[in-house]
Image (spheres, grey):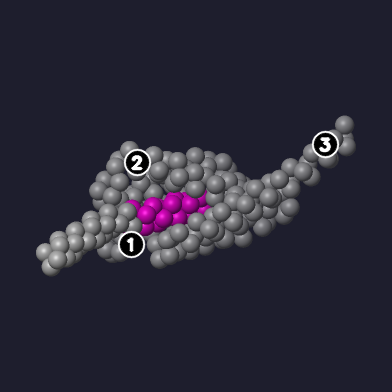
Amino acid sequence: SRGLGDVYKRQSYKRKNTFMEWIQPTSSTMLSLLIGLGLSASCGFRNYVPPFIISLAALGGHLELSENFAWMATLPAVLALGTAVALEVAAYYLPLVDNLLDTIAAPAAVVAGAIVSASVFTDMSPVMKWSLALIAGGGAAGIVHASMAVLRGGSTATTGGLGNPLISTVELGGAVGASILSLLVPGLFLVAVLILAGAGVRIWMQRRANVLPASGHSV
């Protein structure tokens, strides 16, 4: 019986080690997935702020990047992205230019979201990584950007653009805060994204409902 007990213990230990070997990469993959989706959604606020924060975190050794994005953890990358952030932030405070940028930046936000998410997706095949990056990462960035575009359009219509600098400040704060939150508390920002998207869709539906009766009444 002692021999059978030893065999049972060895089998149990082996099964436990096998389970730990399986769960460890899975949890690591899920963590990188949550971080990537949060950062990609942040690109919907500002295209260059999340990549800049990623570059800073990676350069400081606080964030692991996938192999093809090691260049982001370099000083030249930090300087280049920092310059892009400064130009982007300044441009959004210019009258009329901000609305033009919303139109131009829509596809750019999707691309930025895909690249940002792919840069932190680890422990997965290239096909899986880029599929998730394009669909989930790009989609998250597009949803946030569209929601903020609706808010900016409402501000332009109601205040003649005078309230747009406030929207730009909120977007900048959202980009910085959401990027940092995604690194510190992965997954929490995704809940905020869903709330923001729901608010944006609700505002759009209300505006559409107000326009349709007005147009029908004029006919």
Location of residue 140 in the rendering, given as x and y in whole percent from the top left corner:
49, 48
Dot 1: element: helix
Location of residue 214 in the rendering, given as x and y in whole percent from the top left corner:
84, 40
Towards the viewer: 138 or 57:
138
Tell me which secondary structure the magenta stretch mostly adopts.
Answer: helix
Q: Residue at x 33, y 38 (%)?
A: 127
The CA span between labels 3 and 1 is: 52 Å
Q: Which residue is mark 2?
A: 128
Q: Tell me if label 1 and label 2 are in contact, CB under 8 Å.
A: no
**Sequence order check: which comes first, mark 1 or mark 2?**
1
Relative placement, left or right, of 111 versus 158 is left
Dot 3: element: helix
Towards the viewer: 92 or 26:
26
Give the residues in magenta: 28-45
Q: Which residue is mark 1?
A: 57
Question: Residue 205: which quarter of the image?
Answer: top right
Question: Between tags 1 and 2, which lies in front?
Answer: 2
Question: Between tags 3 and 2, which lies in front?
Answer: 2
> Label 1 is placed on what type of residue?
Ala
> Label 3 is placed on what type of residue?
Ser
Q: Residue at x 45, y 45 (%)?
A: 136
Relative placement, left or right, of 129 versus 12 is right
- Looking at the image, which residue sits at the far front? 1
Towards the viewer: 37 or 141:
37
